[in-house]
Image (spheres, helix red, strand yellow):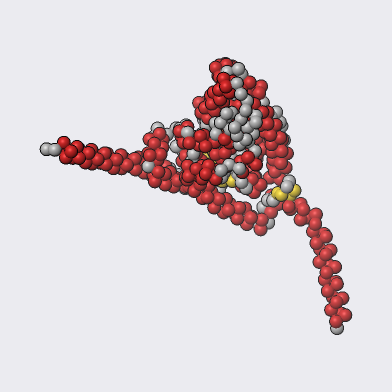
Amino acid sequence: MDSTVKCTILLILLGLVVNAFSVTDYEHCENVVKKWATNSLKHESKEDKHALKDLLFFLHVPRTGGRTYFHCFLKKLYSSSLECPRSYDKLRFDPSKEKCRLLVTHDDYSTSSKLPRGRTSVVTILRNPIDRVFSTYEFSVEVAARFLVHPNLTSATQMAGRLRSKNKGVSTLDIWPWKYLVPWMREDLFARRDARKTRGTSDFTSGDPYNMEDIVMPLLNYINNPIAHEIVHNGATFQIAGLTNNSYLPESHEVRHCVDKYNNLGDYVLQVAKKRLDNMLYVGLTEDHRESATMFANVVGQQVISQLVNSNAIGKEADVNNSEQGTSFSDSELDQNTNSDEKGNETTSSDDNEVNQDNMTVEKLMDTYEVCISGLRKTQTRRRIASLKRISPANFTKEARNRVPQMVLQRIQSLNKLDVELYEYAQGIFAKQHKQAAEKLFDARTLGSIFIYWGGIKLWDACLWTMPFVLLFIFLFVNAKRRTLKLKI
């Protein structure tokens, strides 16, 4: 037989084998993902989702503004004694603690497998996927830049390790996803700084902070990196589905591998994530911050107040020892100054627990929130500026973000198709929640506890204040109309 014919036959046979293997592999993956999705949907609670249960699980999707909700809402309602210890640290997470009422964590939905079934309410906040990717990139660089005070990467790593082992607090480097993203960016920043020193030049070829490769990894390189594919892209969907690389589920790695290999299988993951959003007590949106905060206070805050008052938990002196206070969670998104970084500790402001919980109302909660969030924003801005000075002239601003090429934005969107669809679905849920909250305005029993805020001013108070002037205007208008009619007659 001619060698050419033999070669052709071998290639055909090889192609058939490869094709058969591909079909078999796809079928295997489809079965794996389908089985996971079926089991996940089967375990979804069918109880009343509108009623707060014994334990509140705040599933905090990174870079959605959850820090403000924890510090400015939940810590004003729940005393430290009611928080699950080390909420943000998976390794030391203990939901079995007596009187554990609040869990706030970046861990994914699989954490619920450790929580009391049928006695847990879940809340979350979602953000526009493109903005969330930008924010994740910026925060990764920002935290990593704090280590540039050290002469080299070895020194920075060793010092951080020593101080973390001595300190009882929770470090950013202990918390998912920053325990992966920050060391990655830290190594990259030191490598680029060393390269600049070797070249002996401080001239930069670009004025775009998102493409300043002499100083920091360009955004386009970041989003195309395998680490970003593993952790960042479609992160909200995988977190709500319970399939992050930090999952408690033993099958999570295989499911993620199959979805990454065969993109159409992502529809099953999306279906589970949507169903879980449907069953949540509250779903907020970062972009609709004011409305989300007001709704959270009325939907969640009101029920927490009632629940804790009924259980006589609000107003009690928290019986917490010093070690527990030192280990309570502090949000990884709360930026820190240099000293805090070197200690590797995430510290909260000292006034977190100074609010008087006696006679708490939704109105008082919103007033407290307004003051709290103002202080947090000032602290965040100050620390962000201090951190970014170490990678000057790279400076992430809204103006610079608006100048990012359309090609990069389209790439981010294409890499986050699941998150884009889930966010659109969440917008629909948010609209329904908003409508339900508005309908309560016509309920005389709850009218006094529903407040609409605009620029820190309660609309209800404004209406009461202006009502006499409105009535006077109507009275004058009617009298003038009567006089006009008399003249015509």
Q: What is the quadrant of residue 463 in the picture?
A: bottom right
Q: Is residue 322 left or right of residue 17?
A: right
Where in the figure is residue 229, as x and y percent of width and height?
Answer: 46, 36
- Residue at (57, 20) in percent of width and height: 198
**Residue 459 vertical position relative to residue 153 in the rendered view, above or below:** below
- Residue at (48, 36) in percent of width and height: 224
* Extreme residue toward the left, this view: 1
- Residue at (87, 80) in percent of width and height: 487
Q: Nearer the viewer, residue 81 or 282?
A: 282
Where in the figure is residue 212, as x and y percent of width and height?
Answer: 58, 32
Quarter occupied by the N terminus: top left
**Residue 88 vertical position relative to residue 426 in the rendered view, above or below:** above
Where in the figure is residue 122, as x and y percent of width and height?
Answer: 54, 41
Q: Can residue 247 be seen in this view?
A: no
Q: Is residue 241 visible?
A: yes
Q: What is the quadrant of residue 336 in the picture?
A: top right
- Residue at (84, 79) in percent of width and height: 485
